[in-house]
Amino acid sequence: MIITIRKIICLLLISLLVPVWFSHTNAEVTYPADTARPSETGYLHVQESVLADEDGNEVQLRGVSTHGLTWYPDFINAEFIRDISDDWNCNFIRFAMYSEIYCGEDKDESLSLLIKGIDAAISADMYVLVDWHILHDYDPNMNKAQAAEFFAMISEKYGDIPNLIYEICNEPNGETDWSDVARYANEIIPLIRKNAPSSIITVGTPEYDRNLGSAQMRPLDFENVMYVLHFYTATHHEGLLGELKAAYEAGLPVFISECGISEASGDGTINFDSAVQWFSYLKEKKISYAVWSLSDKDESSAFFKPGFKPDHVPEDDELTLSGTWVRDLIRGADPKTIPYEEGIVEKSRRSEFQSWLSDSLGLRGAEPVFSWAGFALIGAAVLFVSLGFLQMEKKLTEGRLKTYDDLFSHEVSGKKKVFLMLSKILLALSAFFTLVYLCWRVMYSIPHGEGIIPVAANLLLLAVEVLGYAESLVLYRNLLGMKDHPLPVIADDEYPDVDIFIATYNEPAELLRKTVNGCVHMRYPDLKKVHIWICDDNRRKEMRKLAEEMGVGYFDRPDNVGAKAGNLNAAMARTSAPYVVTFDADMIPRSDFLLNTIPYFVDCKKKNQNLPAEKQIHLGLLQTPQCFYDPDVFQHALYSEKRAPNEQDFFYRTIEAAKTSSNSVIYGGSNTILSRRALEDIGGFYTGSITEDFATGLLIESQGYVSLALSEPMASGQTPHTFREHIKQRTRWGRGVIATARQLKIFRRKGLHLRQKISYWSSVIYWYSPIKNLIYILSPLLFAAFAVPVFSCTWLELLVFWLPMYIMQDVCLRYISKNTISLKWSGIYETSVMAHLLMPIIRETLGMTMSSFKVTDKSGKPGRRETDWRAMAPYLILIAVSLIGIIRVLAMIDSGRLISMAVILFWLVRNLYFLIMAVFLIDGRDSDAETVRVTDAEPVTVEVAHGNDKGRIYQGVTTLMTEHKIRVYLDEGEDLKTGMPVNVTIDNGMYKAVLSGSVSDVYLSKHGYTRTQTIEILDFHDTWYEYLQLLYDRIPTLPQSLRKDIGIISHLWQNIAHRVARTRI
């Protein structure tokens, strides 16, 4: 009995639940008999908030929207559109004319498909919405001229046909607001009205057609205009639906030109429950709509399964979940009666990713990436041909282009062999990826159809990139030929006489004293053969007195004709040694300078004795690096004196050394040995240029002499102490090199081989880097801040084509330079001088030559920094524009453009970092009076001079030496207190300095159990010159390579923190 009762209860429950379930699965779907057709209802007009026919009857259009016409052209055919019209009872279709396609290369194809579709829809008795589908061109005003052309043409062609409805801008987005849309609409609508005075026109609203409020507050002053709302039921719920209801109640005519039952991306989850709410309201209020999308794309919103052929009436098994539900909806069914099994249907992760990938790649998809293999073949072929050409050129030039390397058969050591092999591999890879990138740039990245300005900006950038690549090829060619040049061994009696010229004009005597001291301490088998001369071009008594005091020669002359070159020529006329050494006033040579340089000349001369005259090779000049004992403006002002090497190290220690292989070493004006015979053959130092050194070296090499550059520093000097002096120096160098190239006619100059000419050409091109750098900075800004699309690309193309090139360039640069430079530091160097060298370089190019110049001020360091707002102004403006660009890009980020926008943000942030660093560089940093800081361990003895501990001796090492104080670490030095007088002896075996001073500071270590003492030097006891040698007879202890090359954020924060704290170091 109990069992029977339970069965009866169960049956009753089932009988109650089945109808409820059945209503969502097998309910009978009913369709309305009345569906508005143009042949019957004619022109539509706006009546209150909805559409009405010519008789005033309210009309609801239920239709579908196509995807991109050129993406799915098979769906644009008359038979299929008629099938959809008849079988789906569909009275309305929207054709999406993507503005990017119309403005691009496929304009004719897309326009042809559109007209084909319009004609088919008219034939099927359907209303047609012509959609100007903007998306990535987020502001309709960006392509307003093309839109005007488009709508004028379509309205003229179909103006007297009632089927046409016009959607003048789909989904304005980004920072576009209603005032932008209204301004656009006020120009486009009259163009349409001229040909189609009675047609409905729909206007997109901001925020992807989801902001009706602004249109409601400020409607347009035109009749038969409706305002567009877009929704997707899995993304938009009560909030947006509430906005639609509010707009409708307020009397705003709303048209749903695009909607779907998936997520707003067109993919992902399908939400039937939300769809019922939305479309029930649309049905109730007779608000017209078009559902996305009439395609077989592999995404949730597509109506048809992938692979569907639109040549027949779609069967049930060919429809997607979305397609099945939407078909019944379009047929006119009550949304509440359309069956579905689950309210929310999730899409698989894999499918979501595939759809996201497809959407994010945009209109052209992955087509350019598929061209990688072809570009790689082109790159490999060009690389192979280039290497073959280099080998052929090497054989053809044997005997015609003489270089110092021809004197030797080089045996490369094991480590060097590995370094050269890896260098060649990295260079080849870098060249290969750059060629692939340039192929892509030419074939795919130019924004055709975006207008003159974007195309011109792209081509300008491309030209700069090609020029930069050509410049790098010259460098790579020299680097591939780079060899070691071990010091030849010669007998003591073979060392010749040498004249050493120290050129000076306005430098202080005390600066010259250190240079002369370095010269008189130079070692040589017979010091009588070393003739040291101060060449004073300012006729100063203190210089003559200094020369007498130091026991060196002194030259002056009655005038300054020819500037530095004239000064040196005057000295040459009064001397006779076969070799001439030139030093700038601040360059202090190492004691082994002559021993490490002169043997190359002697050895070359000895080898020539066994060769016929036509095969003899004469060494004309030997350049050693210009090294610096004080931090340059970059190291000092950017708080990087412990992390980064001197800015010029890469040039002198890598590029110059590599130029030996092409016999195009640039004479740097100092730290150089020249053959007197070579100088006499060219008529002496060249006086017709403000860069006499560059010109003199070129003339010597064109005369048939070979040149050699060594990588090891042999002398060190001072750098410009302020940014202003740095710019003056670089301006003189840049203008001088360009003027010299024009005067000496490099490419037409007899005596120079093609390789030499190309190498010198690259040296000239380098000085145009301000123009190149400005273009690099402005290119992303044009898009980010001014909406000028300089590039046409997707994020995948950037990852495939740009990223490998960028990585290989940085790796290659770091490895070959032995970590003396990176792309980060190169960017800082070039950006900082960009604004201030730009106009001088342009003026020099136009022939407005610099007739005079000021010698770099080396009188001493400024104590306090001075803020130069005028020098900062260009960078501050660019920083402001960059920040605007970054904000705009952040506002444009969505899931489909995340990676593309991230790459643009990378360049914007990177360039912003360079600009901020330039401002910090100009702002400078406070300095003390110390010109040199030697952080090296030299043996030291400290003796207490007075007091109870008088005579007590401590042993230790130096940790820091300057011209005024030393810091020491002593064994058992705990008792050495501040204020104690001491005697100090520093003896490294070569030099011995005896000093007196007092302890000025005691520094405890972080752990507290070790300490160092700073001793202020009060008396040098006639060992001043010995102490100077302890300081300067060495490679400077500043970084010789990048150390702890922290990222840009850390570097930026470090500089900000120091400036906020106003640290004085």
Image (cartoon, helix red, strand yellow):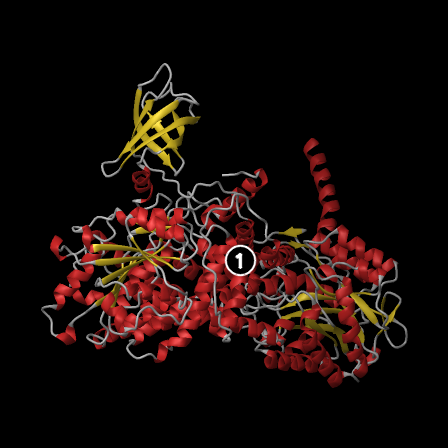
Tell me the quarter of the image containing the N terminus: top right
Q: Residue at x 57, y 78 (%)?
A: 105
In the image, 846 versus 34, the foreground residue is 846
Q: Left or right: 529 with respect to 288?
A: left
Q: Left or right: 227 with respect to 764?
A: right
**Disc 1 element:** helix
In the image, 867 versus 113, the foreground residue is 867
Q: Residue at x 46, y 47 (%)?
A: 860
* Residue at the limit of the structure toward the left, as seen here: 610
Q: Which residue is mark 1?
A: 907
**Residue 64 location, x and y as percent?**
70, 69
* Residue at the limit of the structure toward the top, as seen here: 948
Residue 454: quarter of image: bottom right
In the image, 612 versus 661, the foreground residue is 612
**Residue 612 location, x and y as percent?**
11, 74
Residue 97: quarter of image: bottom right
Number of numbered discs visible in the structure rendering = 1
Task: Tell me: residue 522, above or below residue 889.
Answer: above
**Residue 626 location, x and y as percent?**
35, 55
In the image, 859 versus 12, the foreground residue is 859
